[in-house]
Image: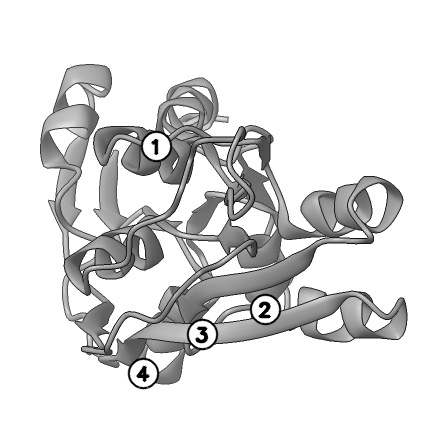
Amino acid sequence: MKILFTKTGIEHEVSEKLETGFSCDFKDFIAIEKIKTKPFPLKNSSLIFTSVNAVKSFFENGFQPNENFQEAHYNKIYAVGLKTKKELRNNGFGTFKVKKHLNDLSEFILKHSQKENFIHFCGNLALDILDKALPLQNISYKKVVLYNTKILYPEIHEKYEAVVFFSPSGVRSFAKFNSLENLKLFSIGHTTEKELRKFTQNKIFTSKESNLEDLLTIIKQNAHS
């Protein structure tokens, strides 16, 4: 099976999992432009990270959370996705709560963390779930954009049997100049699947775990179905 992966940097993981019977190409459909910003005091705010790129830009800009819960200005850290949690750990910080999806994190905060002050570090295309839900319940919420996602819109002339998508913006980038018809479609998660549904009625195979390892398992299981 000839597959196009709509991002680079995952070649090693893919080749380890998809050994024989697969021909894989990799191309970026979006680009990340990090924003330089002057770090400000985090005081006793709770911090939300919804992507690896947000974590990277946060520390590159010189922000420093206070993880000592015995101090008054302790920062609780919330994250969406295991990769985001792992990137925080790579920078020496743990997480108070990790959820697979932003909706799940929003529900947790509304139930258990209503008295906290939240700062959400993210990209310019971040979903507005928290913007809508938290202020309605009088929860202090501020969004800080630390990177921009640039959509590249490349045209693909090769013929593929399947395409693998990793973000709604990647879907939009592909769909502008390329057809989704007669392709087997694989998606990293439900938000990406939802975006695909705007462009096709094809069956979409989606990772329930929203991670690459699970997605590659699904590709192996459904390659010839």
Q: Earlier in the sequence, mark 2 or mark 3?
A: 2
Quote the CA–CA distance across marks 1 and 4: 41 Å
Residue 214: x %, y % from top left: 44, 23
Residue under numbered circle 2: 127
Q: Residues within 10 Å of mark 1 (few under 14, many from 20)?
A: some
Instruction: Name the element at disc 4.
Output: helix
Relative height, residue 18 to residue 199 (above, below): above
Instruction: Name the element at disc 1.
Output: loop
The residue positioned 17% from the left and 38% from the top of the image is: 10
Residue under numbered circle 3: 144
The amino acid beneath tag 1 is: Phe
Q: Is residue 180 visible?
A: no
Quote the CA–CA distance across marks 1 and 3: 19 Å
Quote the CA–CA distance across marks 2 and 3: 13 Å
The residue positioned 41% from the left and 19% from the top of the image is: 217
Residue 124: x %, y % from top left: 42, 78
Residue 140: x %, y % from top left: 72, 69
Q: Earlier in the sequence, mark 4 or mark 3?
A: 3
Q: Earlier in the sequence, mark 1 or mark 4?
A: 1
Task: Determine contact: label 1, label 3, CB under 8 Å.
Answer: no
Task: Determine contact: label 2, label 3, CB under 8 Å.
Answer: no
Q: Which mark is residue 177?
A: 4
Instruction: Name the element at disc 3.
Output: strand
Which mark is in front, 2 or 3? 3
Instruction: Say which quadrant the N terminus sits in.
Output: top left
Which mark is in front, 4 or 3? 3
Q: Viewer-proximal residue, 155 or 73?
A: 73
